[in-house]
Amino acid sequence: MSLQVILEGLGLGILLVLVCAVGIRKGAVGMVHLCSPEVQDRCVKLGLTTHKKIKRNALIFKAFCVPGYIAYVLVCVYGINGARSFAAGFWQLLVILSVMNLIDRFLIDGYWVGHTNAWTIPGTEDLKPYITAKDKQKKWLFGTVGMAVIAAVLAAMMTVQ
């Protein structure tokens, strides 16, 4: 069961990578809503996008991805794996979400954004790194504490009778 849950976490991480790949398919400015306000403002100033488009992309990302990720983990844990108790659901949810978080922190943020040119937005190179040390701290905090809270809330919702 543990291997299956880890593989499901890898599946969720792959979904996240695919979402990012689609988001930057026409250039990294398509995902600038994930960058700091300074980078966003520079993109607007350079005429690469507008604040309205940035807000729209952020809303689309949240409206489709967050519910999609939640549906994915709930189907895996309760539909496929058959969890019934809070404890069984919680640990599986936490593992799946944590594996995805590690993929996001190391593969996407650490390597893809930090060490390749795929996410470089022309005219904003002086604002690199796009993910600052402070941003990384926040992401690690949310990725550990936040994922545990999300797992607990989802497990509680699924076991309320």
Image (cartoon, rainbow, N blue to C red):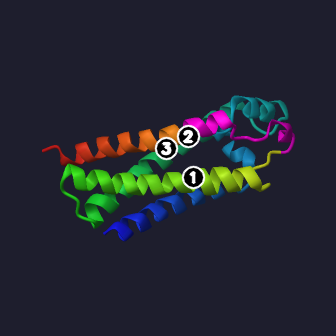
CA distance separating discs 3 and 1: 9 Å
Q: Residue at x 80, y 39 (%)?
A: 48
Task: Give 85 or 52, whichever is nearer the viewer.
Answer: 85
Residue stretch in magenta: 122-138
Q: Is residue 150 above or below residue 12?
A: above
Q: Which residue is mark 1?
A: 104
Q: Residue at x 67, y 45 (%)?
A: 31
Quadrant where the image shows the N terminus: bottom left
Secondary structure at badge 3 equals: helix
120 lies left or right of 151: right
Type of amino acid under label 2: Lys
Q: Residue at x 27, y 54 (%)?
A: 89
Type of amino acid under label 3: Gly
Res. 149 in view = yes
Q: Residue at x 34, y 62 (%)?
A: 76
Instruction: Assess whether residue 76 is covered by the magenta stretch.
Output: no
Q: Are marks 3 and 1 in contact (CB under 8 Å)?
A: yes
Q: Which residue is mark 2?
A: 139
CA distance separating discs 2 and 3: 6 Å
Residue 143 numbered tag:
3
Q: What is the residue that sits farthest to the left in this orientation?
A: 161
Res. 118 in view = no
Secondary structure at badge 2 equals: helix
Residue 70 numbered tag:
none
